[in-house]
Amino acid sequence: MREEGRISAFEAMIYQMTVPLSTIVLVVPAITVLKARQDAWLSGILACLFGFLTVFLAAKLALRFPKQTVIEYAPRILGGVGGKLVGLVYVYYFLFVAYSVQRQFGELMSTGYYPFTPLLFFIIVLTLLACHIVYLGLEVLCRLVVLWAFFGVSFFIILALVLKDMEIHRFLPFLESGVGPVIAGAITPGAWLGEMALILMILPFISDKRRVVRTSLVAVFAISFLFEIVVVASVGTMGTETVARMLFPYFSLYRRVHIATMPILDRQDPVLMLLWVGGMLFKLAIFFHAGVMGLGQWLGLKSHRPLIFPAGALLTALAVQAWGNITELVAFLAEVKPFFISFVNLVLTGVLLGVAVLRGVRDELPRGEKRASADDKKA
Amino acid sequence: MRRRTIKRLKDLLVQSKKPGWSGKKPPLPPEFQPGVPDKVWEPAELEKTPVSSDLTVNCRLLREVMGRNTDFVLREFKVGPQKVEVALAYISGMVERAQLNQHILRNLALEYPATLPVSLASLKEQVVSVAEVKEAADFWQVVSRLLAGESVLFLAGENKALALDVRGYQGRAITEAETEGVVRGPRDAFVEDLERNVMLIRRRIKTPNLVLEELNLGRLTRTSVVLGYIKGLAAPELVREVRERLARIDVDAVFGPPFIEEMIVDNPGSPFPGVVSTERPDRVTAALVEGQVVLFVDTFPCALIIPATMGALLQSSEDYYHPFGISTAIRWLRYLAFLLSVLASPVYIAVTTFHQEMIPFRLLLSIAASREGIPLPAVMEALVMELTFELLREAGIRLPRPVGQAVSIVGALVIGDAAVTAGLVSPQMVIIVASAGIASFATPSYEIAIPMRLLRFPLMILAGTLGLFGLMVGLLGILIYLVGLRSFGMPYLYPLAPLKFGELKDTLVRVPFWMMRTRPETSKRNWYRTAPGLKPGPPPEEEG
């Protein structure tokens, strides 16, 4: 079972960046600040290192099997039953992230913007769009996220406008209660950065595989940098106490933009919401795609397309019933989800890599695997 | 005497009642008489009928096939001193009479060389002074050449006929492009005549590698379709693909590119054009040089460029006739207009209905003041105005010229001014709708402006019901669709998705020609088009 077409390492990098971006700048800063207080920016750096480790292991594992996804080669590493079990955990993990994304999206829309519209409506709309993307395949998905990255940059440029409100004393005192809170605060963003281990699922479709380790690390660095910007900007302008009480500090930050001579820039957070809708859609589509494709491979199907709509409906139901309300959701995101996804992304991947190295299971990376060379073009 | 007078008067009376009807009914021409066999000639049957060496058989058969037509002429005469019988058939409206008289009839009947024996070969080689002469062995060839405007010469004792190209029919002169006007640049546009269209291209590209293949489509119309590409530049797979898709067309009639277009595009249900349709030869030439494939269809004044991309549809050939900085600026203006034509009304609806906090305070006051007393919600107001605008546009195309003025006055005054004064719509809404309308006319390609105008309506409804979120959902849906769309294997949003930085040189900006060193990646071969180091500048200063 193969997707048609191929993607470049650059597209894969943007794909990886899209994975955590839309939630890491939105939900995570509040959680980190709640735990690490004014030293949240240090947590960001720590999380970056954690992300490096996870993604590096994942890329190394993926490159050992350049023609298969993790679902396909797990049985080769761990043997039939164990491999299938691990494969199922991966598939469940992808689908789990997908429905948690659905719920996060629905909650933000219905609490933040449309209080009288039922949650389910937003989830269904987003899921239908995601189904369409998944149906069109990985190639289209990657093109979409690259296009979206153009707009995504504007997320952050506008933050330059709150620079003047930042005050350095809000970051003091430095390391007030030791390194413990800093580490606690790093867990959530670190786990989120680890989501980029999704490279395990798309590596077979990348045309220039040798660049993957480098681009993956660049992706981790870029996203933790953006996360750092949001954390520093929100703590610097609003102070630890305020940010820790918020759900979505980034939106509040956006609302604070005020330039007396340009009133048109005031309160442009609906525009941010627009970009964020796209970001969430692509994050959902990425995990949905990985989950459905993984499920198809796990079951040994020729095509995963028939699974798309049933899986979408199932995810929608799960997204609605899994959490009672937004507070429960945020608590879950802060306390439970990081450990689960870190378990999959770091522990499971690490175990697979370790066993694969010990048993010496690997495929050769095909030589000359690159785009049509310049000679062809000149001919 | 009296009786005679009465009879004459009676006759007069009868005649006055039936003027001119007193005599006998004139006989009908033979074709109208009942009982004439009305045979339907199938191509296969004609193909099986060879040209006979007996001239009378040929003439009888040809009369049977074509004889009923008023424009069919079969002229029999004798050639040379041996008085050999010949017959010349042609369709009177499609040949040039002077040429026919001068080069065929006179040469054959009057000035036949006395010593030359009369045979088809000698006629062909030494007597008939017509450039293009072909032999036809069966009646299908004879008839199809005849119907294409050639004249056919039968010679007694020969089982072949000569098809002589003396075509000459009336056509429109080459005029200025109507829908793709430019300020600076060539003015000529395609006409209905295929040969002249092909000539316009050939004049611009003088390489033997320019191939213009012809094939006939449509069982009844036998329309000539010309497939053009440059060997060594166009990807062979693309040419093969186009050829295959054309070959599987089997219809009765082809009246122009739209008939073909709908049968060869990748996504038949797509509202977006799968090929670029243009009436400008310079644009076609540029496409050929970039390795694309071009289709011409007889009797239609435009060409199809394959494959289509969004970028190509939003470009105008004028971009290359102005300095690159200005061209880039104009191009961006056009992109802006394109976005404005889609987004102006939906954004206005969403912001005024759902997100008033986004509007600066003073502007909000003026909008609120003008909307006070307007009975309709913003979305209905916008829908009504947009609908009116579309009506005016459509009416403007269909109207006879003298009435056009009246409609524009009615449109501007009644719809614009009176509706505002009567308090039915707000002035802001008129501004928004009008600017969106103007913006949509700034889109260089009519084919892409139309689907966008249509998509505006669902977007307006989404914006009116769900605000910016609804608008975003609609736009994302369109974006996903466009990214997934392909035209002959080429992604529709090509240099943007998939992103090719190198290709943006002629999409996002228009770089100067000395920087446009490579062809688009799709042409695959002959990568470099400009020699390096062509940037002009002062000569290097000499030493010492």
Image (spheres, coloured by chain):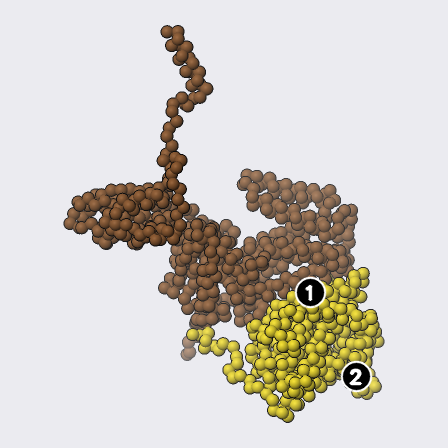
Q: Left or right of A303: which side holds B519?
A: left
Q: Left or right of B261: which side holds A75?
A: right
Q: How many marks?
A: 2
Q: Is residue B59 above or below residue A208?
A: above
Residue A264 placement (x, y as % from top left): 73, 61
Residue B93 placement (x, y as % from top left): 37, 43
Q: Amino acid at mark 1?
A: Leu
Toward the left, the furthest residue is B115
Q: What residue would you read off at disc 2?
A: A184
| Chain A display color | yellow
Q: Secondary structure at mark 2?
A: helix
Q: Quadrant of the C terminus of chain B?
A: bottom left
User: What is the CA distance from the residue labelled 2 to the residue labelled 1?
Assistant: 37 Å
Residue B18 placement (x, y as % from top left): 44, 21
Can residue B520 be seen in the rendering of this structure?
A: yes
Residue B119: image tag: none
Toward the bottom, the furthest residue is A358
Q: Is residue B328 above or below residue B194?
A: below
To the question of a shared chain for discs 2 and 1, the answer is yes
Residue A261 placement (x, y as % from top left): 73, 62
Pick whichever of labels 2 and 1 is earlier in the sequence. Answer: 1
Chain of residue at mark 1 = A
Picture quadrant of residue B364 = bottom right
Q: Residue at x 76, y 76 (%)?
A: A28
Other-residue count near label 2 (Cα within 10 Å), few / some / many at <14 / 14–19 / ≥20: some
Q: Residue at x 18, y 50 (%)?
A: B117
Q: What residue would you read off at disc 1?
A: A128
Q: Which chain is brown?
A: B
